[in-house]
Amino acid sequence: MIKKSSEKKLAIYITAGLPTVSASVEIARAAISAGADIIELGVPFSDPTADGKTIQRASQKALERGIDLSKTFSIARKLKNAGADVYLMSYLNPLTAYGAKRLDTDTISADVSGFIIPDLTPDSAASMRRKGLPLPEKIVYLAAPNTPAARLKKIAASSSGFVYAVSLFGVTGARRETAPRPPAKFLEKLRALSAGKPVLAGFGVSSPARAAALAEFADGVIIGSAVMEIIENTPARRAPEAVGDFVAACKKAIKKKRSR
């Protein structure tokens, strides 16, 4: 469970197994050493509808290299006691295909804190549980700026660990053009409805400055595509250091912010 505090949280997304399994472990450890509080390991999927081109490319490369949910759990096991909470970010299909008993066993053995499932809502999860379909016990749900207040409250109540606030419309991806203003009213409303759970804002975070802008209105920030761009464009042997430097800069930037 991630405790709400005055310190801003930083979550770093890494597609599992890139550029290699061992390198992805080293990159995650470097991110943790640089200040990441949460590591999100992305489970490769053939149709990642919520993700932009960078993570789509990464997912496809990982699939081509045989990375699946089982191997993602193996990576998570290597991050036990590394100093950060580990969440798996997966679409629904790989989880339901895995089987309930195996999913529970591997979640416990890998000490996974929870699952972020972009294509699952609390209502759908409740329906699946009634039918006895396999689902993780601890799920983080996504909340969007156009979500009605009553539904935001349900999303917050149903989320385990923290609430994932989508800071802009569209798919994930680091925005290099002029970044839109942070959705201050949405984030403030969601935090008021979250009953003490931390609200972490993601989507489109491309720089320390953008991370700091979002952190002013949220309890923390999630960065994915910008990290995967570094991994994609850096030789494998240098990727841990490059990611660590970026994470350290982002952590420094958000530390200066106090929530309104």
Image (tube, rainbow, N blue to C red):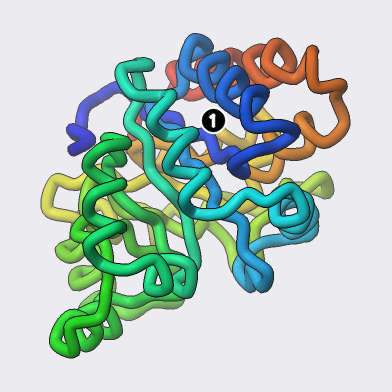
> Element at badge 1?
helix
Mark 1 residue type? Ala
Q: Nearer the viewer, residue 4 or 209?
A: 4
Judge left or right: residue 79 versus residue 62.
left
Q: Is residue 168 above or below residue 24?
A: below
Q: Is residue 205 above or below residue 75?
A: below
Q: Residue placed at 30% from the left, 17% from the top?
A: 81
Q: Residue placed at 62% from the left, 49% from the top?
A: 67
Q: Is residue 166 above or below residue 40?
A: below
Can residue 168 be seen?
yes
Q: Residue 135 in the image: x percent, y percent? A: 27, 69
Snapshot quadrant of residue 1:
top left
Q: Residue placed at 50% from the left, 44% from the top?
A: 72
Snapshot quadrant of residue 8:
top left
Judge left or right: residue 42 versus residue 260.
right
Q: Residue 174 in the image: x percent, y percent? A: 72, 46
Q: Which residue is mark 1?
A: 212
Indicate the quadrant containing the C terminus: top left, top right, bottom left or bottom right: top left
Q: Residue 24 in the image: x percent, y percent? A: 62, 28
Can residue 145 be seen?
no
Q: Residue placed at 42% from the left, 34% from the top?
A: 76
**Label 1 Cα neighbours within 10 Å, binned few <14 / some 14-19 / many ≥20:** many
Q: Residue 147 in the image: x percent, y percent? A: 38, 77
Snapshot quadrant of residue 136:
bottom left
Judge left or right: residue 20 versus residue 72.
right
